[in-house]
Image (cartoon, helix red, strand yellow):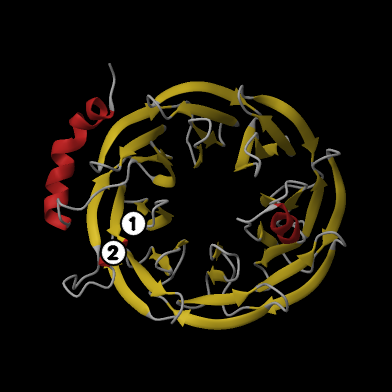
Amino acid sequence: MITRRTFALGGLASGLGTLAACGSRKASGFPGYAFVANQDGGAIAAVDLQVFAVARHIRIDGSPTAVLAHPQLGRVYALTPDTGSVHEILTGNLTFSHKLRVAATALQMRLAPQGDALFVLCRKPRQLVRVALDPMRIDWTLPLADDPADFDVSPDETTVAISSGAGCSITLVDVLNRRASARIRTTGEIGLVRFQPSHGDAARAQSDSRQLIAANVSQRLLSIFDVPRARLMVNLPLAVRPDHLCFKADGGQVFVTGEGMDGVVVVYPYYTPQIGQTVLAGHNPGAMAVSTSPGYLFVANPKSADVSILDIETGKVLAVTPVGTEPSSITITPDDKYALILNQASGDMAVIRIANVTAARWKKGPLFMLIPVGSKPVSAAVVAI
């Protein structure tokens, strides 16, 4: 019989050696796995977060760039843009299950808020694909007029917003009728587009679906649009190019980093959208993640190989922690106990124990341990078991 212990024994010895060097063996882990996409390794690494060791490398066809978890179905989905395919992995026994090709080349994927489908944005051909789950199959496709750059799905799942990058426009897709309902022309190149996250009831989801935040990278603006009217509400000038966006859990704050200065811009998007403050956060800040309790902002600094940890309420930097070479992705475990940082160049995952962020004994920050995970890890999803 295959058990979690069987998977973990192979990597446990090396994991405990790193654990002794970087942290305390008495720390309890998270009852689940982190599934890590190794872009250059052609595999998904399943890291057992109870023993902090790689349980298995799951080979897939192509170079995965993104991984999403569906806890209710016991599935993890990995996207390989170079093969235009979505790969299904079973979380119960850590095995590859199914592959579905949706295009010649793909770009990104998003899990539908209702959990019954994936949306995949494709480049060749230019199209949006809705993939139904359980079983996995193509539900419908929608051709696109321009080369896509980014997309997001509204919390009430009625609208998909797609930016065209150099096309200087945003396409709004009516999901129910499977058609493009509006095209918003913009004054600059739009990169990331995001609806405000919604964790409340249906009324809250509907309200949060009315407002779209778009990163105007060529003019260094954060543009906020009224979705039902398909029109611009306000442009907010930024001190940085909006390369990365991160939301506070309740959606009340948006954190922005990018080329321009070594800081994080704090934006308040609700009611009258406005810039709050700009906080210094290490050298060349990039990817971010937020813990809820306590309210910390973790900011990756790829060039200096560390992570800056800020107190969201005070805006103060609590710690700067060396983590590995070229940190590029941060994931917080669901229990808010650990921050998992993927280091692209060094091929490992740094684990920060959040409870130790403000502990006086941690002079160089709360790094718990480093786990080798594979070649160029770029994305992670955590699943409780």
User: How many labels sit on residues?
Assistant: 2
Left or right: 244, with 92 as reference point? right
Residue 127 seen in render: yes
Q: CA distance from mark 2 to mark 1?
A: 7 Å
User: What is the quadrant of the N terminus in the image?
Assistant: top left
| Residue 165 position by quadrant | bottom right
User: What is the quadrant of the C terminus in the image?
Assistant: top left
Helix, strand or loop at mark 2: helix
Q: Which mark is residue 177?
A: none
- In the rendered view, would you say 165 is above or below 148? below
Q: Given the image, on which type of amino acid does mark 1 rest?
A: Lys
Residue 259 lies, in percent from the top left, at 52, 71
Residue 93 lies, in percent from the top left, at 37, 24
- In the rendered view, would you say 360 is above or below 130? below
- In the rendered view, would you say 118 is above or below 59? below
Crowding around mark 1 (Cα neighbors within 10 Å: few <14, some 14 to 19, many 20+) is some
| Residue 380 position by quadrant | top left
Q: Which residue is mark 1?
A: 337
| Residue 203 position by quadrant | bottom right
Helix, strand or loop at mark 1: loop
Left or right: 180, with 325 as reference point? right
* Residue located 62% across and 58% down the image: 197
Q: Which residue is mark 2?
A: 355
Q: Given the image, on which type of amino acid does mark 2 rest?
A: Ala
Residue 324 seen in render: no
* Residue located 17% across and 57% down the image: 23
* Residue located 81% across and 69% down the image: 232
Disc 2, disc 1: CB below 8 Å?
A: yes
Residue 158 lies, in percent from the top left, at 78, 47
Crowding around mark 2 (Cα neighbors within 10 Å: few <14, some 14 to 19, many 20+) is few
